[in-house]
Image: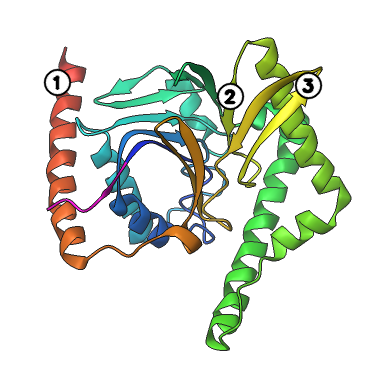
Amino acid sequence: MDSRRSVELVVLSDIHLGTSGSHAVELLKYLKSIRPKTLVLNGDIIDIWQFKKQFFPKSHLKVVKHLIGLASDSCKVYYITGNHDEMFRKFSGMKIGKLRIMNELKLELNGKKVWFFHGDVFDVVMQNSKWLAKLGAIGYDGLILLNTFINMITKFLELKPVSFSKKIKQSVKGAVKFVNAFEVTAATVALRKGIDCIVCGHIHQPEMREIQVDKQSVQYFNSGDWIENLTSLEYNKGSWKIFNFRKDFVEQPAEAEAEFEKMIDLEVKDLFKNMLIDFSN
């Protein structure tokens, strides 16, 4: 019996597979607990910037396998490229089974025009000083590694986990201004395009709010990340919510997980058969 939770649409971003800070184990648990009709992977899924052959754990490979398995008849999967996986931008428009690679996506949900994009296009540092952005990414990854070590100690001492980078972002005025500027800029462009709702990632800040620009408003959603926040966006019956793994996740029965693994294995085989057919035609 399939005990997974049905979800109309799920948005994930900033998973950063291939880095030490990625919570692939928790993400896999979450993915196994849901049955989405549509899955939007909104950029920075695999961290090409910091990819190293010697570091790609089994848990990270299992996430990739699971995502490929979902891209079969059971689920539409849109892979929207981000800055850390920008290598895939040259493949924009490619379709493999139910998987589509895109730089942006526009859907109509409940009569509203929704625009999905990663968000690095609105990052001034990214656009003008990519080397500085990459240097910052390396520093951020080091901070996350240190944070992981510290939280192992806090867990042993039965204390609450801490997030260094989150505290730094919240305490530095410049970081707060950057987040606000990013959100308002994205909202302004969306209004010019006649968009009702924007869904992005990039800044690792889960958010759901209405932004007003020149007496007009647009709904702004950010799916957060799987480095610090462990969040996704879920859409069901006309409404959105932020799913927080640490607060909302319910452990699945082991039997259900094992059964689902078998099903995913079969779906992956079917997907590769379809890929061969697509390439041969």
**x%, y% of residue 97?**
24, 25
Mark 2 surroundings within 10 Å by alpha-carbon count, few (fewer than 14), some (14 through 19), many (20 or more): many
Rendering coords of residue 258 (x, y %): 16, 60
Q: Is residue 5 magenta?
A: yes
* In-image side of 165 versus 73 (left or right): right
As drawn, is 166 to the left or to the right of 27? right
Q: Which mark is residue 197?
A: 2
Q: Please tell me which residue lies in front, 166 or 238.
A: 238
Residue at coordinates 40% horizontally, 25% vertically from top-left? 101
- Which secondary structure class fits the magenta region best? loop
Whole-number angstrom distance, CA of label 3 to CA of label 2 = 13 Å
Front in this rendered view, residue 147 or 163:
163
The first of marks 1 and 2 along the sequence is 2
Regarding residue 128, the answer to whether it shows in the image is yes
Label 1 to label 3, Cα distance in Å? 49 Å
* Residue of label 3: 213
Q: Is residue 83 above or below residue 24?
A: above
Depth check, mark 1 against mark 2: the one in front is 2
Disc ID at residue 277 = 1
Where residue 71 appears, x then y in whole percent? 27, 34
